[in-house]
Amino acid sequence: MSGKILRIGPTDNTSDERTPRSPLLAIPKTARRGFAPWLNPRPASGTGLLDLTHIAPGKPRAQGSAIEVSGRISDGYGRPLRRAVIEVWSANTHGRYAHKDDQTDYELDPDFIGMGKLISDDDGGYVFHTILPGHYIARPDIGRWRPRHIHFSILGGASRLITQMYFKGDPHNDTDPMRILMGDKWEALQVGKEYATADNTTDVGYRFDITVAGKDAVFFE
Ligand SMILES: [Fe+2]
């Protein structure tokens, strides 16, 4: 395709502008094989509560502290992003992902997959239950730990956003490379708005509102 201009009838010259001038580069294999979740085969929970603290009804509760996370997804104009597909994934209480690429020695919890999918409701709202993720060491060679965090992917409207939610007061927040990279954008990802949950199955709730576009968009990982 390099240098070849596609002409489709009368044009405003945008086809010229959009034609690559240089050969296309393949994305390196390592980058394509991102550390993305393999979502479990269960269907998305719809707009209701997604419960990741149990892998199936009747199974034991996952190890660790059960938390609720809720919030509202907004577009670049502050309007609710309805019916957005929200995917979340995180490490278990021991800091281990249920993923074949996580070959660390941290303990696996057979009752925690830590990945799921839900849909925002008519107000852009969402809510899920999960386990407070543990810390893990990302760079053993330099002793760098990742603070507790939950990964989010949001697909809705014209946007796809991938980001992470952090917990206020985490001792590893200040040295996190992601935090350093995002500068002032950090504040929006630091979840300190805790609330008491309405049920007695979770220990605490965290509110994480996410703007996916515009000047207030949260940091895209
Ligand atoms: Fe992570």
Image (tube, rainbow, N blue to C red):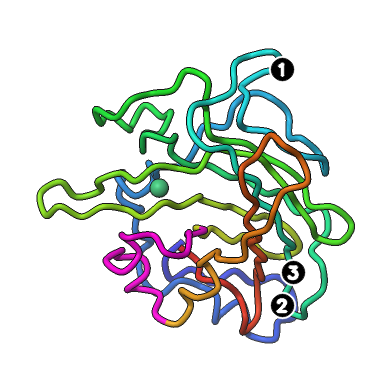
As drawn, is 25 to the left or to the right of 42? left
User: Does the stretch in magenta take in 171?
Assistant: yes
Query: Marks 3 and 2: which is nearer the front?
Result: 3
| Distance of label 2 from label 1 (alpha carbons) | 38 Å
Q: Quadrant of residue 107?
A: top left
Q: Which residue does the numbered mark 3 point to in the structure image?
A: 74
Q: Residue furthest top?
A: 58
Query: Looking at this view, is 198 or 59 the one in front?
Result: 198
Mark 1: which amino acid?
Pro
As drawn, is 95 to the left or to the right of 46? left
Q: Quadrant of residue 97?
A: top left
Query: Looking at this view, is 89 or 15 the one in front?
Result: 89
Which type of secondary structure does the marked residue at label 1 adopt? loop
Q: Residue at x 71, y 59 (%)?
A: 71
- Mark 3 residue's CB less than 8 Å from ligand 1: no
Q: Position of residue 113 (x, y in %)?
A: 52, 28
Assess disc 3: are there few (<14), some (14-19) or many (≥20) residues with their C-alpha within 10 Å of its C-alpha: many
Mark 3: which amino acid?
Ser
Q: Which residue does the numbered mark 2 point to in the structure image?
A: 76
Q: Position of residue 134 (x, y in %)?
A: 39, 42
Cβ atoms at labels 3 and 2 below 8 Å apart? yes
Q: Which residue does the numbered mark 1 point to in the structure image?
A: 57
- Quadrant location of the C terminus in the rendered image: bottom left
Mark 2: which amino acid?
Gly
Query: Marks 1 and 3: which is nearer the front?
Result: 1
Q: How many marks?
A: 3
As drawn, is 45 to the left or to the right of 97? right
Which type of secondary structure does the marked residue at label 3 adopt? strand
